Image (cartoon, rainbow, N blue to C red):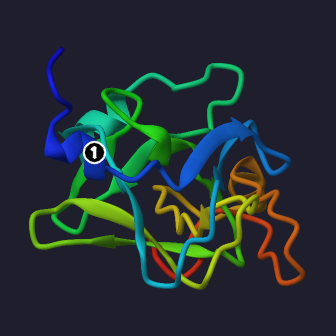
């Protein structure tokens, strides 16, 4: 029998698992302690223009405001609905334990904002950037369900506006 490669021997098991979430649908949960500052997972998917993203059909016709899109600084979008990974299931929170960051190669990673204990659900602030006027109806359509004491009530970033 062939020996396992060195990479296979040294690869640590994932620090997270996808399962049902009390926040919304599916969620990602720590399977062990994750230290502050640690990269947890890369947000992966097909890269498309914002214009192409705007033309996509709803990822969930029963919940048209559910999205697997991640906006990049260069104006493109990662569509995790196509070739995405577990990162697409990380839910929004107004008091998150993770934060996304984009590296120089336009790759997005989710990192621990603080030490996360095994069993905790991973979350980050989506800071959604949607077109149109910020009406009460629009904000409600992107309602936040995080339950944090200082929840702003919406996943939309109230400071950032897209034309």
Give the camera-side residue of 26 and 49.
26
Q: Is residue 153 above or below residue 43?
A: below
Give the percent coordinates (x, y) of residue 155: 65, 62
Give the percent coordinates (x, y) of residue 110: 42, 65
Image-quadrant location for residue 92:
bottom right
Give the percent coordinates (x, y) of residue 130: 49, 56
Give the percent coordinates (x, y) of residue 30: 64, 58
Give the residue at x 69% y 67%: 93
Q: Which residue is denoted by mark 1 in the rendering?
A: 9
Image position of 41 (left or right of 48):
right
Give the residue at x 28% y 45%: 9
The residue most toward the left is: 105
Q: Is residue 143 above or below residue 44?
A: below
Image position of 41 (left or right of 96):
left
Image position of 20 (left or right of 49):
right
> Mark 1 falls on what kind of element?
helix
Image position of 123 (left or right of 130):
right
Give the camera-side residue of 32 and 49.
32
Give the residue at x 83% y 84%: 150
Q: Residues within 10 Å of mark 1 (few under 14, many from 20)?
A: few
Image-quadrant location for residue 81:
top left
Q: Is residue 32 above or below residue 69?
A: below
The residue most toward the top is: 1
Q: Quadrant of the N terminus?
A: top left
Give the camera-side residue of 13 and 78.
13
């Amino acid at each position: 029998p062939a020996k396992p490669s060195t990479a296979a021997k040294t690869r640590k098991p994932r620090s997270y698992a996808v399962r049902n979430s009390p926040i919304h649908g599916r969620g990602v949960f720590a399977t062990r302690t994750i230290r502050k500052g640690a990269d947890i997972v890369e947000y992966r998917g097909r890269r498309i223009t914002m214009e192409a993203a705007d033309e996509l059909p709803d990822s969930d016709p029963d919940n048209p405001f559910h999205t697997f899109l991640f906006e990049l600084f260069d104006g493109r979008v990662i569509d995790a609905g196509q070739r995405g990974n577990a990162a697409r299931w990380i839910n929004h929170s107004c008091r998150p334990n993770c934060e996304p960051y984009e590296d120089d190669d336009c790759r997005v990673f989710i990192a621990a904002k603080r030490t996360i204990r095994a069993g905790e659900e991973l979350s980050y602030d989506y800071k959604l950037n949607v077109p149109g006027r910020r009406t009460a109806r629009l904000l409600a359509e992107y309602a936040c369900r995080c339950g944090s004491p200082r929840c702003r009530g919406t996943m939309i970033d109230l400071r950032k506006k897209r034309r």
